Image (cartoon, grey):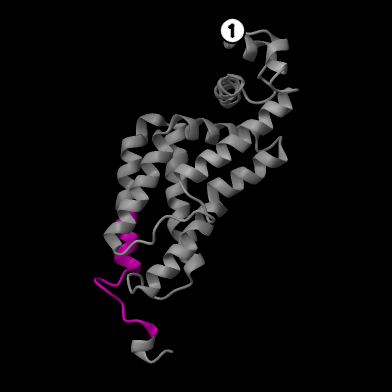
Amino acid sequence: MAKDTRERILLAALEMFSRNGYAGTNIRELAGSLGMGKSSLYRHFESKEAVWNALLDKMIAYYAEHFGSAEHLPPVPDSAEELVALTMRMVDFTVHDEKVVMTRKLLAIEQFRDERARALASKHFLTGLTDMFTPLFAAMMDKGILRRDDPRMLAFAYTAPISALIHLCDREPEKTEKAVRQVEAFSRHFILTYGCGKRCPRPEETGIL
């Protein structure tokens, strides 16, 4: 029961923090939105800062479980078409999952106030995606699906425009459908540029190794 109450508090906090920011979220109002008093909320979390940190912990775990991370990589695509499919599944999740959308808004608001939020914003908006796709692209090069190049630079070139389009969805939700189509078009353009058709020759087949 206590665990369920904590979960309810964190979900309500996510909604309020993403809408009003940390400074604009009042613990009394947060408790009231759940039909409890301030003292009852403090039996579960000792302070607003404790709610904040528990919420960040929860969303880090939720994102890693459902989206992936450099530590929890998705399967390496066996074809260019599988890369497109993987990309579109990730994009569909990140632009339509309400918890993830609210977390992204929360980080965008609080990255200039809170050091932890700043680090998480950098990771989830940029470096984490590069870290995730670098080993995937290296493995795809080994499989002969992508041509040989610096996998980290390729991962950066691939993920940065997609991340920008996801932020467009947050700012202008009415453009989400169009932005998702742009992601797919970009993914296919990337494959045309860096792919090798059915298969690239392996290094040992070209005499490079």
Can you say which quadrant of the picture contains the C terminus? bottom left
The percent position of residue 43, horizontal first and vertical second, equals: 72, 17
Question: Closer to the camera, 54 or 199?
Answer: 54
Question: Closer to the camera, 11 or 184?
Answer: 11
The percent position of residue 105, horizontal first and vertical second, equals: 54, 32
Residue at which label 1 appears: 35
Q: State whether residue 26 is above or below residue 62.
A: above
Neighbor class of circle 1 (other Cα within 10 Å; few <14, some 14-19, many 20+) is few
Can you say which quadrant of the picture contains the N terminus? top right
Residue at screen point 35% across, 73% down: 143
Query: Total number of numbered labels?
Result: 1
Q: Amino acid at mark 1?
A: Gly
Residue at screen point 36% across, 29% down: 174
Say what secondary structure mark 1 lies in: loop
Residue at screen point 66% across, 46% down: 119
Q: Quadrant of residue 127?
A: bottom right
Q: State whether residue 114 is above or below residue 24.
A: below
Q: Which residues are magenta?
A: 186-203
Instruction: Left or right? Give the position of 139 relative to 205.
Output: right
The percent position of residue 137, horizontal first and vertical second, equals: 42, 65
Instruction: Left or right? Give the position of 75 relative to 103.
Output: left
Residue 114: in magenta span: no
Q: State whether residue 11 is above or below residue 105.
A: above
Q: Quadrant of residue 52?
A: top right
Q: State whether residue 162 is above or below residue 62.
A: below
Residue at screen point 34% across, 47% down: 88
Question: Closer to the camera, 114 or 46?
Answer: 46
